[in-house]
């Protein structure tokens, strides 16, 4: 489960150091090599909830093995690709293949909790979260070492042995069948009512029917929205219009079909889960905006080299990992979110104080404070979703949580581009800090009055 789930963050982060040599190899400008990043993000944002739905329908083993096999095939294609655009195809396939393991892990964790009677497997959830954070942090370093040893194609080739390891472990360890997870009372009533109204063909097909039209509309909605967020411009006005039309069509489709891809009715009744998705979006928008904007300012506004900027940011990464390790087994959700949002507000205030001549200690302290929410928010939203989502749809719910994280990354990228139209100036950094401050404040205000989060803790635990 851990090895499979880290395939996505390692491929997301390793490519950062490969963009320049890939561009040099194919004579491609940055605008074209950027699709190596964009392609994986878009494929993953759409693929996570779609494949999560398939995991809920067919079980984790089959989708885990198919996804990791696709990762190996994509790695081989990237290793041998003779052109940039075939390399982009390989990255899209990597995004789809790496979308299977995390929903499969969440589904299997939930089913094992049902089998063993453990209501809150915080240890497993912590390992998943910390492993993903750790790999994301070391990804660029790993990519640099691979490129130094064998060129940029090794960034793709490394997926082949990783895929084989996942296939071997998955075939040996993942159960062929898992206990059926129990849906909540309200959702069970909805499913019974839907089954009663279904025609004979629907009853025969049952849970194996897929809402292909709903999936297609959902994909159009995400793709058009994310393409606009990546490079917002008046000339691309048709993208948000297309996203709005797709959203309306998706809502109409999902409320009328008997086998929806995402049951919007059940989701509307599960307001705590909707709030968790919004918190994920707000939290990761600020997290990614800090990483993108602050890193760029350190190099351009402060004049540091890439290596020195990395050293300045190292305490941020270490703080995030330390906080995750220390608090991961605690089932507290509301306290983590409030602390994370509060530290985001403090980090934004710190960004408003920095100047091109600020002492290095201030730059490091701001990074350390920003590392605390990185170690708390992801853990808290993952734990909240585990308890709030319908157990019978835990994989698709987990996939959708990852989608909201990538939407936050795209929003952060757009905010960074808007704040730095002519380079990463100190004034632009302050504008970005105000944007982040608004999101952090909304996260805090969305969490503060929500006392239901205090009831998510496991049996025998309390949250103050």
Image (cartoon, rainbow, N blue to C red):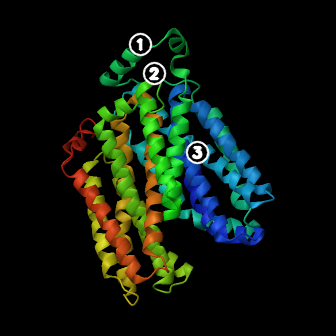
Image x and y of residue 257, in percent: 46, 24
Label 3 to label 2: alpha-carbon separation: 33 Å
Label 1: how many Cα within 10 Å (few below 14, some 14–19, many 20+): few
**Residue shown at 39% from the left, 90% from the top:** 357
In the displayed structure, 422 sits above or below 452; it is below
Q: Relative to the observer, which residue lies in front, 183 or 150?
A: 183
Q: Relative to the observer, which residue lies in front, 307 or 78?
A: 78
**Residue shown at 59% from the left, 50% from the top:** 7
Q: Relative to the observer, which residue lies in front, 179 or 236?
A: 236
Res 438 quadrant in image: bottom left
Image x and y of residue 149, in percent: 74, 68
The image's mark for residue 197 is 1
Q: Residue furthest top?
A: 200
The image's mark for residue 4 is 3
Label 1 to label 3: alpha-carbon separation: 39 Å
Residue 453 horizontal side relative to residue 412, left or right:
left
The image's mark for residue 22 is none
The image's mark for residue 258 is 2
Label 2: how many Cα within 10 Å (few below 14, some 14–19, many 20+): some
**Residue shown at 20% from the left, 52% from the top:** 448
In the displayed structure, 116 sits above or below 136; it is above
Q: Quadrant of the N terminus?
A: top right
Find out whether the residues at labels 1 and 3 contact each other: C-beta distance under 8 Å.
Answer: no
Label 1 to label 2: alpha-carbon separation: 8 Å
Res 384 quadrant in image: top left
Mark 1 or mark 3: name the one nearer the start of the chain. 3
């Amino acid at each position: 489960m851990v090895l499979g789930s880290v395939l996505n963050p390692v491929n997301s982060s390793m490519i950062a150091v490969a963009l320049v040599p890939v561009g040099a190899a194919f004579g491609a400008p940055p605008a074209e090599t950027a699709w190596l990043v964009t392609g994986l993000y878009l494929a993953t944002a759409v693929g996570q909830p779609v494949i999560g739905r398939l995991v809920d329908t067919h079980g984790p083993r089959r989708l885990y093995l198919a996804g990791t096999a696709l990762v190996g095939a994509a790695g081989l294609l990237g290793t041998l690709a003779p052109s940039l655009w075939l390399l982009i195809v390989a990255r899209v396939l990597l995004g789809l293949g790496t979308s299977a393991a995390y929903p499969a892990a969440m589904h299997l964790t939930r089913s094992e909790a049902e089998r063993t009677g453990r209501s809150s497997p915080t240890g497993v959830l912590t390992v998943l979260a910390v492993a993903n954070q750790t790999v994301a942090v070391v990804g660029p370093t790993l990519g640099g070492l691979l490129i130094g040893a064998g060129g940029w194609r090794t960034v793709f080739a490394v997926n082949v042995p990783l895929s084989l390891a996942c296939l071997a472990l998955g075939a040996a360890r993942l159960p062929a069948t898992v206990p059926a997870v129990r849906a909540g009372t309200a959702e069970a009533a909805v499913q019974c009512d839907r089954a009663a109204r279904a025609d004979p063909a629907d009853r025969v097909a049952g849970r194996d029917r897929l809402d292909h039209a709903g999936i297609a509309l959902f994909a159009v909605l995400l793709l058009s929205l994310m393409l606009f967020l990546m490079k917002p411009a008046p000339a691309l006005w048709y993208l948000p219009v297309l996203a709005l039309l797709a959203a309306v069509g998706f809502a109409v489709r999902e409320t009328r079909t008997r086998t929806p891809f995402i049951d919007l009715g059940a989701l509307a009744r599960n307001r705590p889960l909707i709030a968790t998705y919004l918190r994920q979006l707000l939290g990761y928008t600020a997290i990614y905006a800090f990483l993108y904007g602050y890193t760029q300012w350190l190099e351009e506004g402060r004049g540091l080299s890439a290596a020195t900027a990395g050293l300045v940011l190292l305490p941020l990464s270490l703080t995030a990992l330390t906080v995750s390790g220390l608090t991961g087994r605690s089932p507290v959700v509301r306290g983590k979110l409030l602390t994370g949002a509060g530290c985001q507000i403090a980090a934004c205030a710190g960004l408003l104080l920095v100047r091109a001549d600020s002492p290095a200690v201030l730059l490091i302290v701001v990074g350390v404070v920003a590392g605390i929410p990185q170690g708390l928010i992801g853990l808290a939203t993952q734990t909240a979703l585990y308890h709030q989502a319908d157990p019978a749809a835990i994989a698709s719910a987990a996939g959708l949580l990852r989608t909201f994280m990538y939407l936050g990354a795209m929003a952060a990228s757009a905010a960074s581009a808007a704040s730095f139209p002519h380079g990463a100036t100190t004034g632009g950094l302050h504008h970005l800090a105000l944007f982040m401050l608004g999101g952090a404040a909304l996260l805090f205000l969305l969490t503060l009055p929500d006392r239901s989060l205090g009831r998510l803790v496991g049996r025998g635990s309390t949250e103050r």
